[in-house]
Amino acid sequence: MNANGAIKWANGFSEEMHISASGSTLTFAAPSSFGRSGGGIAIFSRIDSARNGDCEHYYSEGALKTRMQICKSGEVTLIKEGKVINVGALAKFVY
């Protein structure tokens, strides 16, 4: 996977991801922060109708009750079954 971004979580873990050119999907390889074990990939797709001010909302295609909110400030909130399970900061790589 060609990572072009990462999230540094409050618990100290960082996870690289690929952000699509349109910003509509975020792909993570072997994510551990999403409450999954065993690796694999996780794809989050933007919910275009759920924009809230300067924040965008994404849902996990593999676990529909897992959501992510990413704000223009870079603040990231990971929500599972309506409860915040982690917060962090987004970084986009510049080549």
Image: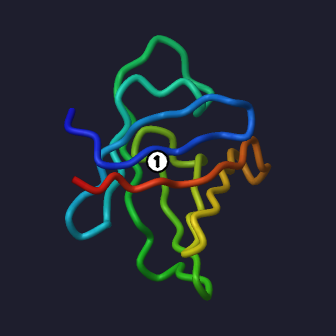
Residue shown at the point (52%, 73%) measured from the top left = 56
Q: Position of residue 77 (x, y in %)?
A: 67, 55
14 versus 4 height, above or below:
above
In the drawing, does residue 12 fall left or right of residue 45? right
| Whole-percent x, y for residue 17 in the image | 36, 42
Residue at left 20%, top 38%?
2
Spot occupied by residue 9 in the image (x, y as percentages of width and height) = 65, 40
Residue at position x 41%, y 66% in the image: 46
- Is the residue 54 above or below the residue 10 in the image? below
* Residue labelled with disc 1: 60
Instruction: Give 34 or 15, whichever is nearer the viewer.
Output: 15
- Give the residue at the far top of this rendering: 38
Q: Residue lying farthest right? A: 83
Residue shown at the point (41%, 78%) measured from the top left: 48
The colouring scheme, among rainbow, by chain, secondary structure or one colour, is rainbow
Instruction: For the N terminus, give its image quadrant.
Output: top left
Count of residue discs: 1
Instruction: Please tell me in which quadrant of the rendered image residue 76 appears.
Output: bottom right
Other residues around mark 1 within 10 Å, as few (<14) / some (14–19) / many (≥20): many
- Furthest residue toward front: 95
Amino acid of disc 1: Ser
> Does residue 62 appear to the left or right of 56 in the view shown?
left
18 left or right of 9? left
Q: Is residue 14 left or right of residue 86?
A: left
Q: Residue 38 versus residue 76: which sits nearer the camera? A: 76
User: Where is residue 28 shown, x and y percent of the image?
Assistant: 38, 37
Residue situated in front as seen by the camera: 39 or 74: 74
**Vertical placement of 41 versus 17: above or below?**
above
- Say what secondary structure mark 1 lies in: strand
